[in-house]
Amino acid sequence: MKNAPENSRRNFLKATALAGLGLGLSGITSPSLYGARGDLHSSVRDISLTRPRPSGQRPVYNLTTKPIDRVRVAFIGMGGRGNTLLNDVLNTGFCDVTAVCDLVKSRAEKAATKIQNKFGKTPKVYGGSENAWEKLTEQDDIDVVYIVTPWEWHATMCVKAMDNGKHAFVEVSAVVTIDECWDIVNASERNQKHCVLLENCCYGPSELFVLNMARNGVFGELTHAECAYIHDLRGVLFHLGSEGDWRREYHKKLDGNLYPTHGLGPVCQYMDIGRGDQLKYLVSVSSLESGLTKTLKERKPNNGKHTGEKYICGDMNTSIIKTEKGRTIMIQHDVISPRPYSRINALSGTGATFFDYPARLALDKPGDYGLSAKSSHSWLNDSDLKAMREKFQHPLWKQLQERAKHSGHGGMDFVTSYRLLDCIRQGITPDITVYDAALWSSIIELSVKSVASGSTPIAVPDFTRGDWKSIKQLGIATA
């Protein structure tokens, strides 16, 4: 945050550094983010206020740029996730990786060797110091900087990349605080550069299927959605040398939804949030914290290394969001409970209801689609659901699924990078803009504030500054 003392931020960044998702860290604290009671700082008392657009800035929701034949990409953070994304970028067929960076310079060098062996071109390597990434953003032959580092780095790196004339592609969540939301919005508008959230769940086959049905009127008038990030991460949170080394720290400091974008991103696209509708306010409630403490006491992970740690984040956080058009969204966060993975991914309207995990679809008038089902009182059988999938398979998934077979998360990682980088290649506005990145990430601090205030309604700031009323609906993307 800009208002934090520089030495406080530097101490935190020195601890987390350019670890990507693979370097062991310990003892992380962040005076720049947290107050004495563990609540988030904000430079504005009312975080719900929509801040005016600074003089001279222009919106970027329809920003177009000059088309380019080959997109030049740089990476900050060459841990496990960074290498996964690197493979996807190299496999697009229209990208050159011109720079790689990691605090552990040997990891950046290893990535550079892989690029050299495959393409005969060696990217410039940065690393070995906490400020090495800054020099990378100054390199001339870069169009897009991939930021694959711990959350605390994201805003600073995005702003620096855009200030140096590059588009920023940032891993989820884009930022942590409302101040940082505004920082990336203003940097994008100020520099007329894109700040794109790499929300791969927006490009999953089920999510694209639901989006395509929504666009083709299957759901009728949309009324309600449900989404979540439910993933038992107890093992990850205590795994030394992984993201757990820094991610667990947030469970000590914040009580709210710590990871909202995987579930919320697709739902916002279904509902045209930021493009004709907008999030208005939320109410958030957390359960007691129990599971992480129980794991610590019973399993004594890492030979008792973490004994004495105190956690405040409730095992389950549930938030209800109201939109300007009167729709509702339920979003949950639970990375502690012993249960199967789910993003819920539900959408309901006057014509249909869909729930995922497992996939289920009910139609008000199944006969309109030539199906065997007779009413909406039952989920479609497997045959009817398959017929609907074939009829409404999204063209982007249809075109890229073969190429995506060996990519992460069932192929949606490759589809994400291909589509968003192809937008830069074509010079068109990406599907996920800085306003989406800020809005979806803002749920972290907004939920924390609601929980802390006894689950009172908290208004959602409008990062488009009113432009959502006229921004066009997200189209049907193709490769």
Image (tube, helix red, strand yellow):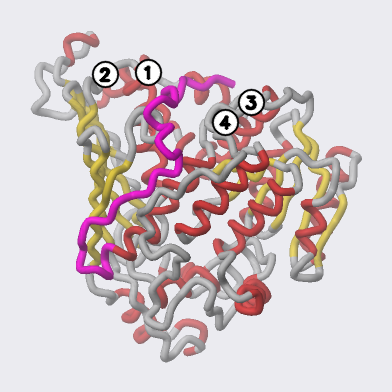
Residue 318's disc is: none
Query: Is there a contact, CB below 8 Å, between mark 3 and mark 2?
Result: no
Q: Which residue is mark 3?
A: 64
**125 or 412, which lies in front?**
125
The residue segment tinted magenta is 450-479
Query: Is there a contact, CB below 8 Å, between mark 1 and mark 2?
Result: yes
Going from the N terminus, do you reach mark 4 or mark 3 first? 3
Q: Which SS class for mark 2?
A: loop
Q: Which residue is mark 1?
A: 392
> In 3D space, how far apart are the residues under numbered discs 2 and 4 (Cα atoms)?
25 Å
* x 35%, y 86%: residue: 297
> In 3D space, how far apart are the residues under numbered discs 4 and 1 (Cα atoms)?
22 Å
> In 3D space, how far apart are the residues under numbered discs 1 and 2 (Cα atoms)?
10 Å
> In 3D space, how far apart are the residues under numbered discs 1 and 3 (Cα atoms)?
29 Å
Q: Which SS class for mark 3?
A: loop
**In this view, the mark in front (4 or 1):** 4
Q: Which residue is mark 2?
A: 218
Residue 430's disc is: 4
